[in-house]
Image: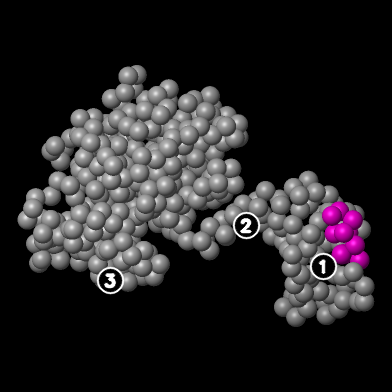
Amino acid sequence: MTEATLTLADIREAAKRIEGAVVRTPTLHSKTLSAITGANIWLKFENLQFTAAYKERGALNALLQLTDEQRARGVIAASAGNHSQGLSYHGTRLGVPVTIVMPRTTPVVKVMQTEAVGGNVVLEGETFDDAYAHARQLEAELSLTFVHPFDDPHVAAGAGTVALEMLEDAPALDCIVVPIGGGGLVSGMGTVAKAHEPPIEVIGAEARLFPSSHNARFGGGLPCGGDTLAEGIAVKEPGKFTSRVIERVVDDIVLVDEPHLEEAVSLLLQIEKTVVEGAGAAGLAAILSSPERFKGKNIGLVLCGGNIDTRLLANVLLRDLARSGRLARLQITLQDRPGALFKVMREFDAHNVNIIEIYHQRIFTNLPAKGLVTDIECEARDRQQLEALVKSLTDKGYHVSQVELN
């Protein structure tokens, strides 16, 4: 296999190579998500891999093609994500020393997870680019083999085995929506999809804050950067090899915003009872952002990873409840006199809205000295119940405002 090509035969060979060493994850139809979106949705649960991400496939395929000398010297990579764990796990299992260079800013939990599966972590630099440059320096100094997280034909071929399994389980698919970061996954899956008879439509899903592949494809100059929930696909520049494959096999690239990423993560947990990171939910987020585009199609989505910080997941779930009107923070202006708060509480009781927290503010306010603002965090059955409470308070002369999320 040359650097310029990726074929169905390459991916089938990768499948034989890694068979039995990675989880043959299920592809299941989601009746509820299909009803919500209007599309016929099939989910490929790659978050059920041992390291909770599809990255194991490409890392293992690359490791299994090393020479004896390369295996003895070891491999190196720059990664603060799923690639580091997949490479470390399978490298250790095969007796290949694995060094992972991460920025010093990498969360401790990611360092610990990589070390727990056998990786030797080196912290260097403040950014990923710094870590990447140091990894390349160590590669030369120590005669190690660099395993790129995406811009490598062996890695992309391993990733493509996801699509082979998906189509075995759901042969009637006419579209797949695949997250795009560096492009390894969509290159592999897209190659399989286009070799199918008939060819399957391939749509890439990319975070709007990091539209690198979208810019490369359409010549746009959209800004690239920011804090995205989909950090696994937050890539400022797609791979050179993968870009050539993407040009050939990807029909279109959809940009997804942060609210839809959050909604997708929340829906997958609530409906499918499965934990998915932001990047893993990008495919569903694309459908939620453009439902008419996908309506009525048989669509395959790959839940490519499930490594999300638990505190971040909790925030996402609570924010989703707020957007749906089940949680709210109401700001109510009161007069500072006995019984004022009690009268407000009676309205909450009458509408059966549960109060979670109450905050009083007397000092830092532009109200008169005898005025105060109370913030009440509350829980309602649905938005209609909350709106009825707000109307009742307003009708009784209270000034009520609601803290809105983006």
Q: Amino acid at mark 3?
A: Leu
At 84% from the left and 55% from the top, the residue drawn is 352
Q: Name the secondary structure under disc 3.
A: strand
Residue 103 place in picture, x, y as percent:
31, 68
Whichever of callouts 1 and 3 sits on the residue coming sooner in the sequence is 3
Q: Nearer the viewer, residue 177 or 337?
A: 177
Q: Amino acid at mark 2?
A: Leu
Residue 287 place in picture, x, y as percent:
51, 36
At 43% from the left and 42% from the top, the residue drawn is 45
Q: Is residue 388 visible?
A: yes
Q: How many marks?
A: 3
Q: Determine the image quadrant of residue 356.
A: bottom right
Q: Nearer the viewer, residue 42 or 203?
A: 42
Q: Which mark is residue 378?
A: none
- Dot 1, crowdedness within 10 Å: few (<14), some or many (≥20)? some
Q: Is 365 left or right of 268, judged from the image as shown? A: right
The residue under label 3 is: 123
Residue 355 place in picture, x, y as percent:
78, 63
Whichever of callouts 2 and 3 sits on the residue coming sooner in the sequence is 3
- Dot 2, crowdedness within 10 Å: few (<14), some or many (≥20)? some
Q: Is 107 left or right of 15, judged from the image as shown? A: right
The residue under label 2 is: 318
At 50% from the left and 50% from the top, the residue drawn is 275
Of the two numbered discs 1 and 2 in the rendering, the one whose residue sits closer to the viewer: 2
At 46% from the left and 37% from the top, the residue drawn is 43
Extreme residue in the left direction = 69
Task: Write the start and end of the magenta stretch as one range.
Answer: 343-352
